[in-house]
Amino acid sequence: SPAPAPALPVTVPSADGGQVAVASTDRVVPLTGSLNEIVHTLGLGPQVIARDITATFEQAARLPVVTRGHEVSAESVLSLRPTLVLAETTTGPAEAIRHIRDAGIPLLVVDPAKSLDDVPRRIDAVAAALGVKEAGARLNQRTAERIAAARAAVPAQTAPGKRPRVAFLYLRGSASVYLMGGSDSGASSLLEAAGAVDTGKESGLGKDFTPITSEALAAATPDALLVMAKGLESVGGPDGLVKIPGVAQTPAGMDRRVISIDDGVLLNYGPRTDQVLTSLIAQLHGKA
């Protein structure tokens, strides 16, 4: 379908307070992979001139990277002469955001996504800033239909006690970082939609992530472990994963039940979330 024609100028509310006036979307710099993906999916990919390190999807590969790890470089961003910068409340450092705004560049902050319920709000916020509200409404409808279709593949569950129990693990083997996701990790909503129990949330881990302990894993008794593909690779695959203290003793460790999903999309909560759900449901319920 042809790219939507932006109706500009617009003034939109920013999640960090205040209003942002947007006069042109000719040169857009999204500072997170999920925001970049939304701009592309709205049909305005050709106006995107840069990406951050987490924008790993195919169309973004051609773009220059303007972050060092998760740190935004204000100089890199400003050197590209953007007409609109998109960020999240977690994007930093704060002085880089301030520096970009002080240079007179419109910078919109969007709340980060933590659940399926956040998908439409984020698409609406980005579409409004780009002056393509109708395209946003259409994308929201399409995304909702696809998520509903993905969820239809979940086997009809009987008692809640029969649902597969899944622990979400964040792994960075090179840095010896082994964490278990709690209620704020962002994975709970996906796991629940896939017909599973998030054992970290259920066992009362309130924060986003907590260092893995044998005791916490034993208490969680997961039937399967959800990991990001690069994280799994960093510990040496499933064989390395079961060497992390406590993992081998869980039902998941004994059965080597590991669900692996691409880092760049797992927690994005955006236009590709239906694909994440489809993969998660297939791996979880044995229909891969």
Image (tube, rainbow, N blue to C red):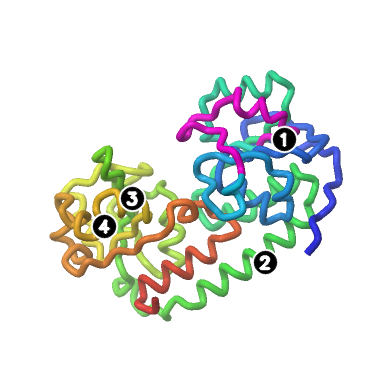
Was residue 281 drawn as part of the magenta stretch in this picture? no
Q: Earlier in the sequence, mark 3 or mark 1?
A: 1
User: Residue placed at 70% from the left, 39% from the top?
Assistant: 28
Q: Which residue is mark 4?
A: 237
Q: How many marks?
A: 4
Q: Nearer the viewer, mark 4 or mark 1?
A: 4
Spatial separation of the CA atoms under disc 4 and disc 1: 40 Å
* Residue 218 seen in this snapshot: no
Q: Which residues are magenta?
A: 63-85
Spatial separation of the CA atoms under disc 3 and disc 1: 33 Å
| Residue type (three-letter) at the residue carrying disc 2 | Arg
Q: Which residue is mark 2?
A: 142
* Residue 29 seen in this snapshot: yes
> Which corner quadrant of the image does residue 105 belong to?
top right
Q: Which residue is mark 1?
A: 84
User: Residue placed at 34% from the left, 53% from the top?
Assistant: 201
Q: Earlier in the sequence, mark 2 or mark 3?
A: 2
In the visual, does 217 lie left or right of 128?
A: left
Residue 27 rendering spot, x and y as whole percentages: 74, 38
Badge 1: few (under 14), some or many (20 or more) residues near its Cα, within 10 Å? many
| Residue type (three-letter) at the residue carrying disc 1 | Leu
Q: Is residue 165 above or below residue 236?
A: below
Spatial separation of the CA atoms under disc 2 and disc 3: 31 Å
**Element type at marker 4?**
helix
